Image (spheres, grey):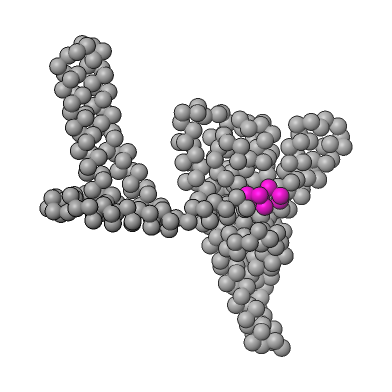
Amino acid sequence: MDQAGQIGVVLGSLGLASLPIRLLVHWESVAAVIEPDSTSATVLRAVAIVFSMAATVYLWWAWARGGRLRHFLWPEPIRFCTQAWRPSLWTDVSDRLWSFVVSLQLPRLFWLGARGAVGTLIWLFPAMVIMNVTREGNEAAAGLVGVIALVTLGYILMTLPMLQAHFAAENRFRAIFEWRRVRREVHAAPWSYAGAMLVSLVLLPIPLYLLKIEATPQEITWLPCLVFVAFMLPARIATGLAMRRCRRLSLESQSSAMENPDADSDIHSPRWRRWWNTMSRWGVRFAVAPAIVGVYLLVLFASQYTSWDGVDTWIRQHALLVPVPFVGI
């Protein structure tokens, strides 16, 4: 997150520095249209060039010192005059830049995400069946197959987000198919699991379907992509936090059972706590989680009639796959 913040500050500074340059260029073009070869247009063009060069030097100097917010607010002119001309400074900058790029671990994260996407697509096979039935099937048998696939998909969605978090933590392809282990860990913290499911399947992904009603022009596709990532990143974080709590409580329960194999941990707990734990597990499993998944499936079913993707929306689920709209991933 710290590295992402640095990248955001750098990109934000670049965008802010470009605004006055764009304004000067716009004024220069307007002046040239009104009066070609005018003095005003020439002056504005020269000012834009000078400002662009000054902004470039200012930004490079701030980036060379670390790219933090304080480096953009105060340029340290004395240090600039004494050190900016030294080759050793820029050699150190190139080394730090390379170390920063390496620390991002982009190849490892890309490979992790690619394998996670493949595993998720395998779990979404019922969605592929629904898509084909909706597109081609008009008979009663096709409808029955679609209903069965829909129920199966709902059952899978009750665990799939937690399976993704488990796979990311283990970094093993087989981990995304360890259904029983994840379900056992989820039972240790049912309300954390329910909260993560509510965030990752209802609160954050559902509003994004409004942006998929109409295709965005190719020139500004990056803008809704930023919105999708900004919404789905907290959902991924919530799932990871819930999985961490479930795993920690599950390990504590197992350790307690190993230390006292003949003792029942619930015997020494108050009766109301035992009742609450039992009701929480069964209530989340058979009421809360199915209700959350049901709302998501209802919106997903309706989106095939409202989304620009049509029936392909069954596969292009930003809640589970790469949150990039209008692209087939």
Residue 282 in the image: state x and y as whole percent: 71, 64
- Residue 16 found in image quarter: top left
Does residue 281 appear in the picture of this structure?
no
Residue at 70% across / 87% down in the picture?
Answer: 261
Q: Main secondary structure of the magenta part?
A: helix
Magenta part of the protein: which range?
Answer: 117-123
Going by the image, does 96 lie left or right of 219?
Answer: left
Q: How many marks?
A: 0
Does residue 323 appear in the picture of this structure?
yes
Residue 306 in the image: state x and y as whole percent: 63, 31
Residue 252 in the image: state x and y as whole percent: 60, 77
- Residue 324 found in image quarter: top right
Residue 191 in the image: state x and y as whole percent: 60, 63
Residue at 82% across / 30% down in the picture?
Answer: 138
Residue 118 located within the stretch drawn in magenta: yes
Residue 107 located within the stretch drawn in magenta: no
- In front: 108, or 218? 108
